Each structure stands twice: as C-alpha cells, then as structure tokens.
Image: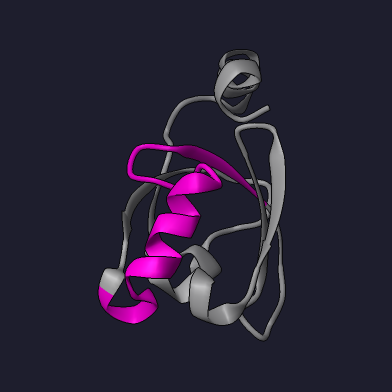
Amino acid sequence: MRLYEGKAGGFYAVEEISREKLGEEWTKRMKALGLMKGAVLLLLNKKKSGAAAVKVRGTRLALGRKLAESIEICPLEEKKSELKERGRRTVG
C-alpha cells in the first residue's frame, strides 16, 4: 500500500521508495531524512488531498501527495505498546 493509504495513528515499515516517480535527487533526500527501506514510521495525520505527516526516527515530516504516493509501506502487526517501547530508538 502507498503511504497516503495508511491509517493515521498506525505504525508502518517502509518497503520501497519509487525512484521512477521521485527521481534520484529526491530519493537521496528521503534517505537523508531517514525514510529508507526498513524504516519504521508512525503516520501522524493524512489529508484527503494525499498529503501526510509522519514521524520517523524522532523527526516529524510533512509530505506532499507526490512524496506520499512514492512511498510503499507495509503495516506492522506487532502491538502498538511493544512498538512504542521499542520505537524510542527507531521512531522517536
């Protein structure tokens, strides 16, 4: 599923960032911000327009529709309490 399709308040793992949609420069920028394959993120908020706010590695990011469409995510099946405890190091 794409990032903009996730449920607010849910934890997700990044599966892929599409280089075809973003290009090499934006893909590198996303990696520099902590959005890379395997990163755990918390979807804080999403808009009907497709924009989303996420928290990854202790940093809050606001992403426009194009960025949110380019990030493929997978929902994490673990309990939220376990993730919150473990996430202090990975999510923030």
Residue depicted at 43% across the width and 37% down the height = 39
Instruction: Give the x, y percent position of residue 88.
Output: 65, 18
Splitting the image into 4 quarters, where does residue 17 fall?
bottom left
Q: Residue furthest bottom?
A: 49
Splitting the image into 4 quarters, where does residue 83 fall?
top right
Residue depicted at 71% across the width and 76% down the height = 47
Nearest to the observer: residue 36 or residue 3 = 36
Left or right of 3? Residue 64 is: right
Residue depicted at 40% across the width and 68% down the height = 25
Is residue 40 inside the magenta stretch?
yes
Up-down relation of residue 80 to residue 32 (above or below): above
Up-down relation of residue 44 to residue 38 (above or below): below
Left or right of 51? Residue 79 is: left
Q: Residue furthest left?
A: 20
Q: Looking at the image, can residue 68 be seen?
A: yes
Instruction: Give the x, y percent position of residue 66.
Output: 51, 80
Left or right of 5? Residue 7 is: right
Q: Which residues are magenta?
A: 20-43
Left or right of 15? Residue 77 is: right
Position of the N terminus by quadrant: bottom left
Instruction: Give the x, y percent position of residue 32.
Output: 49, 46
Q: Looking at the image, can residue 2 be seen?
A: no
Up-down relation of residue 84 to residue 7 (above or below): above
Splitting the image into 4 quarters, where does residue 11 fall?
top right
Is residue 45 inside the magenta stretch?
no
Q: Residue furthest front?
A: 25
